[in-house]
Amino acid sequence: MRCSPLPIVNIKSASFFKPAFWTRFIPLRGINKLRDKMHLELSKLSTDFSQIEASQSGHFVWVDQPDLLVTAVKMVIDKI
C-alpha cells in the first residue's frame, strides 16, 4: 500500500555493477534480483513515484550519468 503523497524520483541503473572482468566472480544475477526487489518496494512508498532508467550506469549513477541526477532533482522541485 502506498502511504505518502511526497514525490519520489527513483534512478534505476541497468545493473548494480557495470560489467567488467571482475564482475564474473560475484553473483551479479542475484545482486540485481535483490536490487530490483528493493526498487519495487521503494515504488510503494509514495503515490507520486517516478522512475528514471540509467541505462549507461552501474550503482554509481552520479559518476556515470550525473545529468540524470540533475534531471531527478528538477523533477522533484517541479512537483513541490
Image (tube, helix red, strand yellow):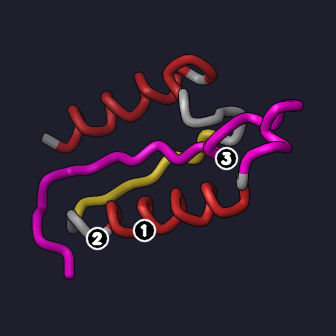
Which of 6 and 57 lies nearest the eye of the viewer?
A: 57
Residue that badge 2 annotates: 44
Residue that badge 3 annotates: 15
Disc 2/disc 1 C-alpha distance (Å): 7 Å
Q: Where residue 69 sits: x, y (%)?
A: 43, 27
> Looking at the figure, which quarter contains the C terminus?
top left
| Image position of 65 (left or right of 56) | left
Q: Nearer the viewer, mark 2 or mark 3?
A: 3
Question: Residue furthest toward the front?
Answer: 25
> Looking at the figure, which quarter contains the N terminus?
bottom left
Say which label, 1 or 3, has the lower sequence index.
Answer: 3
User: Disc 1 marks which amino acid?
Assistant: Leu
Q: In the drawing, what numbered circle is on residue 40? A: 1
User: Disc 2 marks which amino acid?
Assistant: Lys
Q: In the drawing, what numbered circle is on residue 69? A: none
Which residue is at 28% across, 70% downward? 44
Which residue is at 72% across, 60% downward? 29
Q: Is residue 3 magenta?
A: yes
Which residue is at 81% across, 43% downward? 25
Q: Name the quadrant containing residue 4.
A: bottom left
User: Disc 3 marks which amino acid?
Assistant: Ser
Which of 52 and 42 lies nearest the eye of the viewer?
A: 42
Say which label, 2 or 3, has the lower sequence index.
Answer: 3
Which of 28 and 8 lies nearest the eye of the viewer?
A: 28
